[in-house]
Amino acid sequence: MSHPISTPLPAFPSEAFDRLLPWAFSEDEGHGDVTSLATVAEGAVGRARLLCKQAGVVAGLPLVERVFRHRGFHPNIVLQCREGEAVAAGRVLMDIQGSLRALLVCERILLNFLQRLSGIATVSREYADALGSSTTRLLDTRKTMPGYRALDKYAVAMGGGTNHRMGLYDMVLVKDNHAEACGSVRAAVDKVHADYAGKYTVEAEVRSLAELESLLDAPVDIILLDNMDDRTLKEAVAMARARAPRLKLEASGNMDLERVRRIRDFGLDYISVGALTHSVKALDISMDIVGEHSK
C-alpha cells in the first residue's frame, strides 16, 4: 500500500496544466488581441524579460513554454534561475525572444499562473522554515482553487512542504461529519475497516482527548488532532506516544507561523496548514519588453 503523503519532489503536472489553457485563452484572448493586432506589425520580433519584483520562491517555470506552445508559438527561452529557487527582489527569471504579438498575447496568462504558484511556494517555504530542525513535516490540504489542485500542491512541494492526499479517492480521512453520521469517530473507523481492511491508509480526526483515547487500539494509521489548544495538543501527543507509538500524529487548525514555531517540538509527525493554498498572495512578477525589431 503506497503512502498518500508524498516526500519526493513531484514533476510539473503538465497534463493538469494543459487542461486549463483552453479556458485561459478563451477568457483572455477571446476572438483576438485587438490592441496588439492594431499596434504591432505582424512580423515584429521582440525580447522580453521576466522580472521578480519581490523576494520569494519561484515555482512554475516549466509552464511558460507550454503557454506559448498551446498557441503554436515557439520563442527562444533562456532560464536565469532554477525551479524552486529562493530569489531576491530584482532577479531576472528568464529571457524570452520571439514574435512580439505572441509575447503580448501570452503575457497575462503566463504571469497569472506563475505568480500564483510562486506565491504558494513562497509561503510554503516560510512555514517550512518555521519548523526549523524539527522532524515534523509541513502538509498541505484540499483547500485549493477548483481545477488547480495538482498545480497548487506542486507549488507547495517546491516551497518545501509535503503533499497530503490529492483527493477523496486516495486515502481515508474520517472527519467530524463522518463521525456524526456514524454516531462516533470509533464507529466510523470500524466501518471503514470492515469495508476496506488495509486497502487504504486511514486517518481519523479527533477533537478531544476522549476521542483520541477511543482510537488508540483502532485500525487507524494517522490521528488528526484538530483545533486543540497547545496544552491539550501536548497532552494528546504524550498519550498517543505512550500507549500507541505506532500511530502518526497530525495537528491542524488555527496554524499561523507563530504557532508553528511554538508547537514544532511537541513531537508531531505532521502539521497541516490550509492557508498555504486557500489564501494565496501572488508573488510580484512582471514581463517587460526590452527590445524589438521587424523581420
Image (cartoon, rainbow, N blue to C red):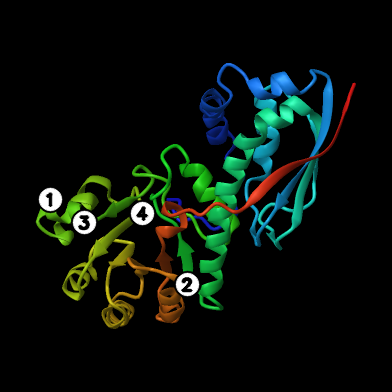
Q: Secondary structure at mark 1?
A: helix
Residue 27 seen in the current view: yes
Residue type beneath disc 2: Thr
Mark 3 touches mark 2? (CB < 8 Å)? no
Please tell me in which quadrant of the rendered image residue 275 appears. bottom left
Label 2 – label 4 distance at C-alpha:
19 Å
Residue 10 seen in the current view: no
* Crowd class of label 2 (few under 14; some 14 to 19; many from 20; radius 10 Å): many
Residue topped by disc 3: 189
Residue 180: % across, % down: 13, 55
Residue type beneath disc 1: Ala
Please tell me in which quadrant of the rendered image residue 45 appears. top right
Label 4 – label 1 distance at C-alpha:
21 Å
Of the two numbered discs 1 and 2 on the same chain, state the one appearing first in sequence.
Answer: 2
Label 3 – label 2 distance at C-alpha:
25 Å
* Discs 1/3, front: 1
Mark 4 touches mark 1? (CB < 8 Å)? no
Residue topped by disc 1: 181
Residue topped by disc 4: 201
Residue topped by disc 2: 136
